[in-house]
Image (tube, rainbow, N blue to C red):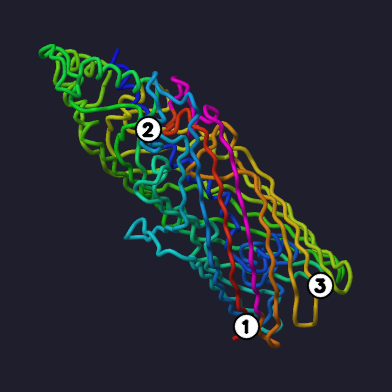
Amino acid sequence: MMTSSVSRQLKLLGWACALALSSSQTWGQLSQNLVIDSKATALGNAVTADPPGVASIHYNPAGLAKLKGRQLEVGVTNIVFNFQTDFHAPDDYSVFNIDGIENDPIFNGDNLARSRTGTLAIYVPGYGLQRLPKGPGLLPTVGFTINSPGSKFTFGNFIYGPDVVGYYRKKDDPARYLGKSLALQRFTYLSPSFGYEINDEWSVGAGIMFSHQALAMDTYLRAPNLLLGFAEQVQEAFDCESGGVSIGPFLNVCGGNIGPWDDIGGLSIQVQETISPKYHVGVLWEPTDWFAWGASYQSESDMHMKGTYDLRYTDDWAGFWQGFNGSVIGAITSGIFSLPSGVPREYGNLSIDLTHPQHFQTGVSVKLNHLLTLNMDVGWTDYSEWDAFLLKFDRDLEFLGAARLLSTNATTNTLKIPLDYKDVWNWGVGLEQHITSRLDLRLGVEFRNSPIRDERRDSLNPLNDTVRYGTGLSYQWDRDTVLDFHLSYLRSWEYIPAGTSDNVNSTDIQNIAYNPYAGVDVETNLKVITFGFSFRTQF
């Protein structure tokens, strides 16, 4: 029975890898349209009918038709964030009658453990996951457009990061078991696009965006489950700490110390897709000088991300299995159930099939009077496409060999991860006040909904329904030059009561997802501030 209990928990180790991948992908919704353009940010991203310069390539390529001559645009966004996670241990927090407040190292006798980070991380091709210096992170953008005199076509290209997020935690941070460091980014390095002015009222646009998609993550692993609690009790019964009760070669459970709050090991994953294309189309209708309507669509992009994984087990974890398999009962049991042999490390190549979802957005821009313009947008993202992720390994792995005994989603070298995400609708409102012929002031608010269902929430990704506020100004420096500035604030808060999420704190013995904080109340609090500017001029 001890063998079954411990082996079952090892089967969960494979799901730790999968959960980290699936959870980190949901950051894409939070970072979508977060750090692209100053005008859009200040107006709550309600710019489909009022496209923002060269960044129209992303928001509505039909807006390129409004840019005449040759335009150059450069922008910089500064990002400051604070990501705090609180773990609250209930008074009855325990695993198999073992007191968690006293024995769980993240609590150390207290019922509150607090994680906090404000350190950014990025993925650098060829170098992997990199921790950035403390302070604001700088995200640049650059683009240009060309319109020949008298031509109705405007061509352009924009280099930017549509989805960029990453953070780094200290090694002893309480949240290290669900993401010590993470970088998820989509960087568009080539986006040849055009806008065409059909007549005075209608414009259309289209283009292709070529992007680099990357995911890198480091995390520690543990499994506070009833089964490992039982395993620790068995080790105590065999007096393993004092040398163990000898029953000859028949059974050895004292090769290494294991328990519900002991480290299992560390996992590192780095995958990327160097060429990930999407096409986009847009339309703009301006029947009068006070009303405009716009719509844009971005296709989905099927990706086959490739990279490496490195799973390093602790000496205690590997030692336990080496000792157990060296006994008669262990050898027989392992042969029947494909239990781990106790290797200290498993590493190799990994691929992930992933679809970057399609997105549709539409909106209107209405000049209320000569001083005020109101923009309103609504957008839809197809996150129900993420019903599952498929991970493919380059060899048969020990933890997958055991996992397939519990789930039809696992084979010896593949793992399918059910997600069951839902489509989301977001909407934004922006107000622009025309102070003078040169100066405009802007205010905006964007309501951002989460694709994650309540039973899938976790502390790796603090994504939930939230509101983002923006403000800024635009100044016409001269006839050919425009400066845009913005400041935005977003706060995302979530409370996950113990036992309510299959991805962080479930106490169900049958749950095969990774729950490193089983039985603990989890509270996440994310604050993000961005400020920056863009500079557009003719050349």
Q: Amino acid at mark 1?
A: Thr
How far, Cα to Cα, is label 1 from label 2? 59 Å
Residue shown at the point (32%, 60%) measured from the top left: 127
What amino acid type is highlighted by mark number 3? Asp
According to the picture, the residue beneath numbered tag 2 turns out to be 104
- Image location (x, y in percent) of residue 299: 59, 52
Under circle 3, the secondary element is loop
Residue matched to label 3:
200
- Please, what is the three-letter code of the amino acid marked with disc 2? Asp
Q: Is residue 69 left or right of residue 322?
A: right
Image check: 1 left or right of 59? left
Q: Secondary structure at mark 2?
A: loop
Of the residues tagged 1 and 2, which is closer to the observer?
2
Q: Nearer the viewer, residue 310 or 115?
A: 115
The foreground one among 317 and 74 is: 317
Rendered location of residue 173, percent (x, y)? 39, 46
Does residue 117 appear left or right of residue 308 in this picture? right
For mark 1, what is the residue? 537
Which of disc 2 and disc 1 is earlier in sequence?
Answer: 2
Comparing labels 1 and 3, the label whose residue is closer to the camera: 1
Report if residue 485 lies within the magenta region. yes
Front-lying residue, 70 or 324 = 324
If the image is split into quadrants, where does the C terminus sit?
bottom right
Q: Identify the image quadrant of the N terminus.
A: top left
- Would you call the spot at circle 1 few (<14 residues within 10 Å), some (14-19), or many (20 or more)? some
Please tell me whether residue 252 is drawn above or below residue 534 in the rendered image. above
Q: Do the residues bearing badges 1 and 3 touch, measured as CB atoms within 8 Å? A: no
Q: Earlier in the sequence, mark 2 or mark 3?
A: 2
For the record, the magenta segment spans 483-512
Toward the viewer: 141 or 198? 141
Q: Residue at x 31, y 44 (%)?
A: 309
